[in-house]
Image: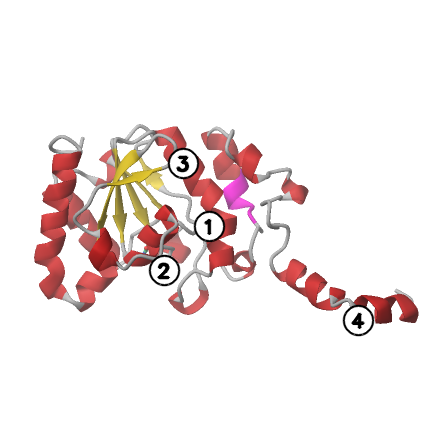
Amino acid sequence: MDKRRASVLSTLGVERYSARAKRSDACDERGSLAHLGATDETIAAFGWDELATTVAACTRCALSATRTNTVFGVGDQRARWFVVGEAPGADEDAKGEPFVGRGGQLLTSVLRAAGLSREQVFIANVLKCRPPENRNPTPDEVRCCKPYLERQIALVKPSLIFCVGQIAAQSLLGVDTPISKLRGAVHEYGPDKIPTVITYHPAYLLRSPRNKQKTWDDLRFAMGVAGGVGA
Ligand code: URA
């Protein structure tokens, strides 16, 4: 680039823009993903194979540079219950599977109390890549990654979404309401108004075991919304 052009671009703040574009790769305001040909709109039409392949190669945000594995999601693609978490942690990043650490073991027990095995539900996170140091997802990361979760939910067509944790719930529902106000109500997700129940994140329960009773209340509430035991 010649000096004059560089100086004009610098005056316009374009240097800063291109640095940011590099960090965040191709996920712009409209969610275009030019180099993979996958925009938010094309993702919304993907089948399972295309979706999995695109997630595995995703560089929509900077988390692609620090992840070990993408964490697509696991379970029954025709499940009645869709469990939504926040983002992979260290164990999940290492294994490429959601909720496999201590919190995951607790989630598995919670589901079992509803008569559900991990294989009978579908489990996925809002983010498919681990945020470094397990920090909270940024709004930009959620915006880039959410079309994948939206498509997963559309393909599964669950009769209930069971969402764990305040950040997952706020990201999924697009609200900033605290979890204390989100619990105990039936929310509606997406154009199909899928009944959605919010409970605490298992990692929070590991830190505050006295809230396990409230989780059991949420689980019974969810079972009622889903019309009995999940499967
Ligand atoms: N926490 C989450 O929200 N998801 C996981 O997969 C693991 C921990």
Q: Are marks 4 and 3 in contact (CB under 8 Å)?
A: no
Tag 2 or tag 4, which sits nearer the N-term? 4
Tag 1 or tag 2, which sits nearer the N-term? 1
Indicate if the residue with disc 2 has its beta carbon within 8 Å of ligand 1: yes
What numbered label is drawn on residue 11?
Answer: 4
Q: Residue beneath label 3, please? A: 152
Residues at marks 2 and 3, CA–CA distance in whole angstroms: 20 Å
Q: Crowding near pointer 4: few (<14 within 10 Å), some, many (20+)?
A: few
**Residue 19 drawn in magenta:** no
Q: Position of residue 43 (x, y in %)?
A: 53, 35
Q: Position of residue 118 (x, y in %)?
A: 23, 41
Q: Residue beneath label 2, please? A: 89
User: Quick check: 12 above or below 41?
Assistant: below
Quarter holding residue 132? bottom left
Tag 3 or tag 2, which sits nearer the N-term? 2
Highlighted magenta segment, given as a residue range: 54-58
Quarter holding residue 192? top left
Horizontal relation, residue 65 to residue 156: left or right? right
Q: Amino acid at mark 2?
A: Gly
Q: Position of residue 229 (x, y in %)?
A: 12, 33
Residue 11 or residue 73, whichever sits in front: 11
Residues at marks 4 and 2, CA–CA distance in whole angstroms: 41 Å
Tag 1 or tag 4, which sits nearer the N-term? 4
Point out the frontmost of discs 1 and 3: 3
Q: Quadrant of the C terminus?
A: top left
Q: Are marks 4 and 1 in contact (CB under 8 Å)?
A: no
Q: Crowding near pointer 2: few (<14 within 10 Å), some, many (20+)?
A: many
Q: Amino acid at mark 3?
A: Gln
What numbered label is drawn on residue 120?
Answer: none
Q: Crowding near pointer 1: few (<14 within 10 Å), some, many (20+)?
A: many
Tag 3 or tag 1, which sits nearer the N-term? 1
